[in-house]
């Protein structure tokens, strides 16, 4: 049990701040470990899907190395297949871990896919496709996917607004590539930066007060 000294009310559950006044609360008596709200687990057949993915991954890697030994080429494409499969498993792990917050998962995907594309581009000889195409497309697609997901799943605004803002800021990264003269194909970067600017202008206009409230709650101001 916790008690708010400002509102003078007892609060059930593991609350660090009062849901009424947002001030820090103090422990009073026995600590409740569970939330007063029921925990509804997300149900999906993940074990069957994981077994299928493991089977296909092992078979793909084994066949690629066998084929490479029979028909060797200058490009070590079995290692590229292995790198791609490792990338896929990292993405799957992020989705499973963050499945309760879709927008947070998308922000993780932006950072993960961008990093993997740069590493992959560097490994195969650096042609610049990662900064010319991959990162801008990932950022643009993530913003579009985030907009669709919050509409389709009907998420609560408080659950996604800050992550939406973070994704919009990440989509400005291609603008840095343009300023530094690193890219030769500016169109994907232009699309990413344009979508980012639209979001960064629209979010404060329509949800500015909510952003301030969420920041105050998370920073305990």
Image (cartoon, grey):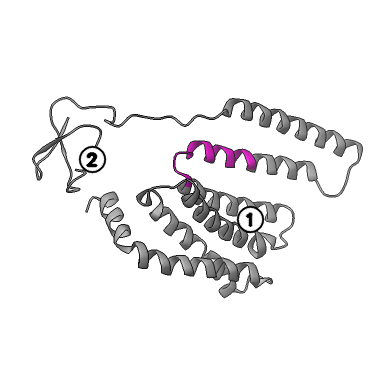
Q: In the rendered image, which quarter contains the N terminus?
A: top left
User: 154 above or below 12?
Assistant: below
| Residue 64 as seen in the image, left or right of residue 46 | right
Residue at the location (71% across, 33% down)? 57
Q: Position of residue 120 (x, y in %)?
A: 68, 51
Which image quadrant for residue 87?
A: top right
Which residue is identified by label 2? 16
* Region of the chain picked out in magenta, as a range: 88-102
Q: Position of residue 45 (x, y in %)?
A: 57, 28
Which residue is identified by label 1? 118
Circle 2 sits in a helix, a strand or a loop, which is it? loop
| Residue 6 as seen in the image, left or right of residue 119 | left
The answer to which of 12 and 151 lies nearer the viewer is: 151
The answer to which of 37 and 218 lies nearer the viewer is: 37
Q: How far apart are the alpha carbons under marks 2 and 1?
A: 40 Å
Residue 96 among magenta residues: yes
The answer to which of 71 and 218 lies nearer the viewer is: 218
The numbered mark, 2 or 1, whose residue comes first in the sequence reads 2
Q: Identify the mark at residue 157; answer none if there is no mark.
A: none
Q: Position of residue 46 (x, y in %)?
A: 57, 29
């Amino acid at each position: 049990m916790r008690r708010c000294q400002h509102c003078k009310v007892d609060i059930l559950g593991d609350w660090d701040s009062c849901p009424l006044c947002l001030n820090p609360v103090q422990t009073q008596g026995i600590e409740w470990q569970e939330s007063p709200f029921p925990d509804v687990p997300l149900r999906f057949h993940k074990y069957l899907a994981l077994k299928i993915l493991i089977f296909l991954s092992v078979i793909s890697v084994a066949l690629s190395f066998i084929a490479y030994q029979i028909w060797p080429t200058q490009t070590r494409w079995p290692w590229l297949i292995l790198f791609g499969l490792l990338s896929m498993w990292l993405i799957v792990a992020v989705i499973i871990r963050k499945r309760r917050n879709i927008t947070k998962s998308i922000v993780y995907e932006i950072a993960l896919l961008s990093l993997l594309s740069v590493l992959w581009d560097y490994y195969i000889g650096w042609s610049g496709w990662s900064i010319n195409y991959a990162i801008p497309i990932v950022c643009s697609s993530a913003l579009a996917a985030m907009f669709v997901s919050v509409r389709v799943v009907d998420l609560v605004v408080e659950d996604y607004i800050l992550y939406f803002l973070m994704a919009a800021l990440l989509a400005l990264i291609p603008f840095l590539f343009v300023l530094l003269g690193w890219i030769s194909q500016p169109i994907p970067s232009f699309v990413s930066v344009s979508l980012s600017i639209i979001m960064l202008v629209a979010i404060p206009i329509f949800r500015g007060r909510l952003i301030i409230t969420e920041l105050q709650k998370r920073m305990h101001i």
